[in-house]
Amino acid sequence: MAEAPKEANPGEELRPVLESAGPLPPLVVKLLETRSAMGGTLQIRPCSAVVKPPSSEMLESIGRHPHKGYLEAGAPPGNLLIKSSSTLEAFMARCQELGFTIDFR
């Protein structure tokens, strides 16, 4: 973003990419539309992936898996947050152990 031309709006370029993962929280929408006058430091927690299972049953099944050390607390409701110290491949393998088919997009 620091290397973007001055006439470019990085928020406008980033918004469609983020929206492809699902609806954005109102605060994120506001941050992408305007430059904040607040200043300060934004703490970002890296993760390997945010996963949205299609049903609450699937979400609960994956969350109860005995090898769930790859999940991180604090995921948005209805989602799973894969730890940055884990690999997406390990998570997908565990889901396959539970009998789920993986559709990686």
Image (spheres, grey):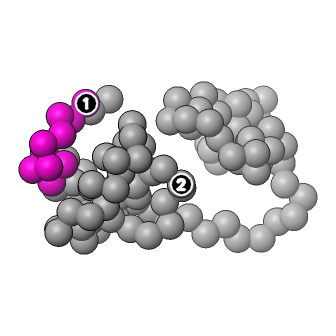
Q: Position of residue 57 (x, y in %)?
A: 34, 47
Q: Residue at x 38, y 68 (%)?
A: 72
- Relative depth, front residue between 4 and 52: 52
Q: Which residues are magenta?
A: 93-103
Q: Which residue is mark 1?
A: 103
Which residue is denoted by mark 2 in the rendering?
77
Q: Earlier in the sequence, mark 1 or mark 2?
A: 2
Question: Can the viewer see residue 88?
Answer: yes
Amino acid at circle 1: Asp
> Which three-letter amino acid code belongs to the residue tagged 2?
Pro
- The location of residue 7, given as percent across then percent down, is 78, 29
Pointers 1 and 2 in contact (C-beta within 8 Å): no
Within the magenta stretch, is there residue 94? yes
* Residue ranking furthest to the left: 97
In the image, taking residue 45 as reference, residue 1 lies left or right, namely right
Q: Which quadrant is home to the N terminus?
A: top right
C-alpha separation, residue under disc 1 versus residue under disc 2: 21 Å
At 65% from the left edge and 41% from the top edge, which residue is drawn?
Answer: 24
Q: Quadrant of residue 40?
A: bottom right
Q: Is residue 101 above or below residue 56?
A: above
Q: Relative to 14, is 40 above or below?
A: below
Q: Closest to the observer: 99 or 103? A: 99
14 w.r.t. 65: above or below: above
Provide the secondary structure element on which disc 2 rests: loop
Residue 71 is situated, as x and y percent measured from the top left of the image, at 33, 65
Q: Tell me where residue 89 appears, x and y as whole percent.
A: 17, 49
Magenta stretch encompasses residue 47: no
- Badge 1, how many Cα within 10 Å: few under 14, some, many 20+? few
In which quadrant will I find the C terminus? Answer: top left
